[in-house]
Amino acid sequence: MTMTNRVIEEFKAEFKSVDITEAPYEKQGYHLSIEARTGNLLNIIDFLDKREFYIIDLFCVDYQDYLELVYFFNTHRELCRIKVTLKLDPVKPVAPTISNTYTIARWYEREVHEFFGVYFEGHPNLTYLFLHEEIGHYPLRKQHVPVPDGDKKLLNSFRPHEEENSFFINLGPQHPSTHGVLRVVLKMDGEYLISAEPVLGYLHRMHEKMAENKSYMQFLPNPARMDYPGALLFNLAYVEAVEKLCGIEVPERAKYIRTITCELNRIASHLLWLGAFPADLGALTPFMYAFDDRENILDILEDVTGSRLTYCYFRFGGLYNDINEETFIDATKRFIERMRERLVMYDKLITGNVIFINRVKNIGILEQGQAKKYGFSGPVIRSTGIPFDMRKVDPYAAYGSIDFEIPTGHIGDNMDRYMVRMKEIEISLNIIEEGIKRLPSGPFKTEKVPKKLKPPKGDIYNAVESTRGETGVYIVSDESDTPYRMRWRVPSYSNLMTFPHLSRGVLIADAIATLGSYDIVVPEIDR
């Protein structure tokens, strides 16, 4: 019996009056749909929590007649994606908080509150997360809905209150130890942290709102602006979602080239982190070596994509253009040979360095039990020993045809996060090498894909394994050439929100080491 069938049987036995509907996974990207009510939502959440489901995402859709909260869940053991929806009155939208069960919901619910005006009963801190206080309406509502004066008072930006024997400092928004324009308000007792509060929005560009005002084709360049070090992986998440929504087939050659170029981009992103992480700890030499290696990848990708950073190479039904096998493959093979030698050098320069070991070993330990509460993913979850990778869990592109291992850590500390990423570079080299061997001939794109796409009415969730973890795109189509609603589930968001938990009671120097080990990309969080 599959987990989906088991969940259906157990759910029907426990909830007699709640409908649970099976969904065609290939078309919608989830297995089950549950329509909750305000009175039974917490019981449904408790049901999923007891069965070890983690929360993928929580967001809102404005259907004008009603607001719909959408909760996505999955398990780390077996793919069983569940969508739970809750309809709310658009005039006075109120829902119970689920943050007592799923800690990451504290931040998701704050986001929904400031963009849609939903009030979450029992939430400990419904303050602005992204927007500033002068915003007078809810930005993602379809109609102009002003923010009531009472909510403006409630939504004052985070302002710490001083207490005896403690003081506050700002880590950021322009601090050399942060990656991008991130601000964290630190409450300190000497050099030890009492608490840490992330303050977001300094790079906020409202991509989800832009999606509602652009055609599917016009939005193609946007994903690369969210995760600039791993732009191809976000590009892939988007085109695959639209392809599934429209029923567009992709040639096998395009699937393999997508896989090869994505893995090159993954290595380039990891090298950016590899240079920055030791620099956070005071070691500047690895930065020079890592960027030297990274330049080799950028040369290869520039030759085929025309860009060195914000790639927009994939198209609906395939690729923008085919690779030049003679130049692209030869250059890639040379890079693989070079990079394997460089990994030996990095092992001596960084991994075995006693100063580096003392700064990262047994510091910033994330326990496996926290994975369900926060929904963190990528190298962060794999460092705890959980072998969860979307390329294996739900294969896409050509990953289902290429065998590779999933590296894991032991205790989930900063050292484990470092080791997992270093091993991933080696595995990405193996995937690229195997992809080149298996690269088929044939067309690189599907012919006759309409320039103006009008997908059938419905919704879809599509996820890929980006450099930092599970990246998901949720699209609601109303049969027009513009998405009715587009939601981006980004891994840096849930990964970062573990920082307040991990930083409590630690030295500020160790907190900075932990933050650097996450490989945070702030434009991805701010979207």
Image (cartoon, helix red, strand yellow):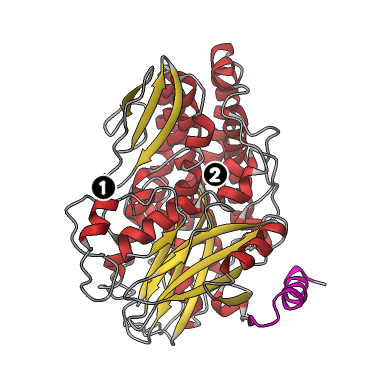
Furthest residue in direction right, as rendered = 1
Can you tell which mark lies on residue 105?
Answer: none
Residue 200, given in percent of the width and then of the height, sits at 33, 44
Q: Is residue 105 visible?
A: yes
In percent of width and height, residue 484 lies at 35, 77
Seen from the viewer's position, the closer of residues 206 and 244 is 206
> What residue is at 57 percent from the left and 39 percent from the top?
425
Numbered disc 1: secondary structure:
loop
| Residue type, label 2 | Lys
Name the residue beneath numbered marker 1: 156
Report the magenta stretch's main SS. Answer: helix
Residue shown at the point (52%, 36%) measured from the top left: 501
Q: Quadrant of residue 30?
A: bottom right
Say whether residue 9 is magenta: yes
Look at the image and tell me in which quarter the N terminus lies.
bottom right
The location of residue 146, given as percent across then percent down, is: 20, 67
Q: Which residues are magenta?
A: 2-19
Q: Amino acid at mark 1?
A: Asn
Residue name at image x 37 percent, y 52 percent = 126
Q: Please give left or right for residue 346 compared with residue 450 in the image.
A: right
Q: In this rendering, is residue 270 above or below 281? A: below
> Is 271 located above or below residue 228 in the figure?
above
Residue beneath disc 2: 333
In this rendering, does residue 377 appear at all? Answer: no
